[in-house]
Image (cartoon, rainbow, N blue to C red):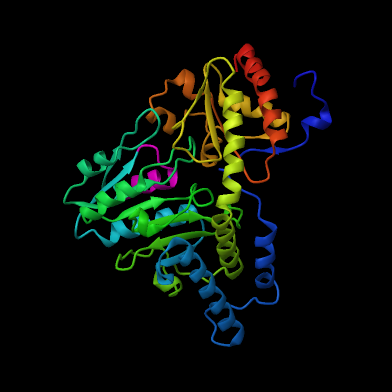
Amino acid sequence: MPEHVSQSEAQRLIYMDHAATTALDPRVLESMMPHLTEQYGNASSIYALGRQAMQTISHAREDVAELLNCQPAEIAFVGCGSESDNLAIKGMAFASQKKGNHLITSSIEHHAVLHTCNYLERFGFETTYLPVDENALIDPDAVGRAITDKTVLVSIMFANNEVGTIEPIAEIGKICRARKVPFHVDAVQAGGALPINVAALNVDLLSLSAHKFYGPKGMGILYVKQGKRILPQLQGGSQERGRRAGTENVAGIVGTAEAFRLAQEELETVTPRIRQLRDRLIEGILTIPRSRLTGHPVQRLPNNASFCFEGVEGESILIHLDMLGIAASTGSACTSGSIDPSHVLEAMGYPPEWSHGSLRLTLGKENTEEEVERVITLLPAVVEKVRTLGL
């Protein structure tokens, strides 16, 4: 710990890992509370308490559909973003086996997509993993060239969870639409940061996760365009129009719809301030010797500031930041326990001496200018110490 930092200052949490999760918005909790207490009915029950629960779910579905510019029947509530990805990819692949066995995705997808494609390969599916450029951008024309008469699904993320690059989704979707190939988008990181209009984006399936936009953990959304058939991955009841068996989490569904509504409605007021904080963070941190910004310099999520530092281990930086009361990440939270270099940075062409030293700082609506300045002040000494110790 730097000598000029007091113990009390070090213990004041500065949370800059909003790509990993967000705090539940108090307004969202308030909307959920009645359905955790007196309105506890099972939506499959035919008596009044059950009918009330079903009506509540229907209203939430309508709210989400309006925000996404689709029909309520095209919305399914699921258990998380990973389940949404799994249901979209496995569901479409298995439902389309008579047509073909070819999938297309990118080399920088979240593991919820990559591992799902790996799983399907055990059942005879083949996957094309498209490369990206040094900014993590996917070439839409490469998607078109990869499509064959056996292609049953293209799955490309809206924005990368590690480096924040926003992909040309509408353009890719237009190519897929012209070739009559279903297009799935993992929009988990974009849900609380970008406007999402499924019609304008030309997508057929889209995944969201509530806890990324100040909603409850354990809740996700899957949009499935009308006419696209997916094979359900959970067998049981007929909930969610037969797409996802299991008793509905009414409180979670209400909280998800409310959180998504708030996130989308507040984009115009919240995003400019967060982007300004992000730009100041980037400006200050790039003064550190042998540092690089990762991801696209402009076409990136408004809250994402991601870096590489040559000759250090990102995990060591995290430990020292944690001692100073700063929460950050080296990349995807799902792989934060691993010491392997980021598959995203490897795909972008970073050598090990750089990719091992990754740091992701992702801002939220509660972060302040003072917190940003504190990180800018403390991080150079942390990196220098880690380098000196050879960590």
- Asked if residue 128 is positioned above or below residue 241 in the image, the reply reads above
- Asked if residue 266 is positioned above or below residue 48 in the image, the reply reads above
In this view, the residue farthest toward the bottom is 47
Residue stretch in magenta: 107-120
Location of the N terminus by quadrant is top right
- Residue 24, quarter of the rendered image: bottom right
Predominant SS along the magenta part: helix
Camera-side residue of 281 and 164 = 281
Q: In this rendering, does residue 124 appear at all?
A: no
Q: In this rendering, does residue 78 appear at all?
A: yes
In this view, the residue farthest toward the left is 149
Camera-side residue of 282 and 12 = 282
Camera-side residue of 374 and 107 = 374
**Location of residue 121 in the rendering, given as x and y in whole percent from the top left corner:** 29, 47
In this view, the residue farthest toward the top is 388
Location of the C terminus by quadrant is top right
Would you say 192 lies left or right of 117 here?
right
**Location of residue 351 in the rendering, given as x and y in whole percent from the top left corner:** 42, 20
* 109 drawn magenta: yes
Q: Residue at x 31, y 47 (%)?
A: 171
Q: Residue at x 40, y 47 (%)?
A: 113
Would you say 88 lies left or right of 50 here?
left
Would you say 158 lies left or right of 123 here?
right
- Asked if residue 282 is positioned above or below residue 122 in the image, the reply reads above
**Location of residue 27 in the rendering, given as x and y in whole percent from the top left corner:** 68, 61
Total of numbered circles in the picture? 0
Would you say 368 lies left or right of 340 here?
right
Q: Residue at x 30, y 39 (%)?
A: 129
Q: Residue at x 53, y 31 (%)?
A: 306
* 32 drawn magenta: no
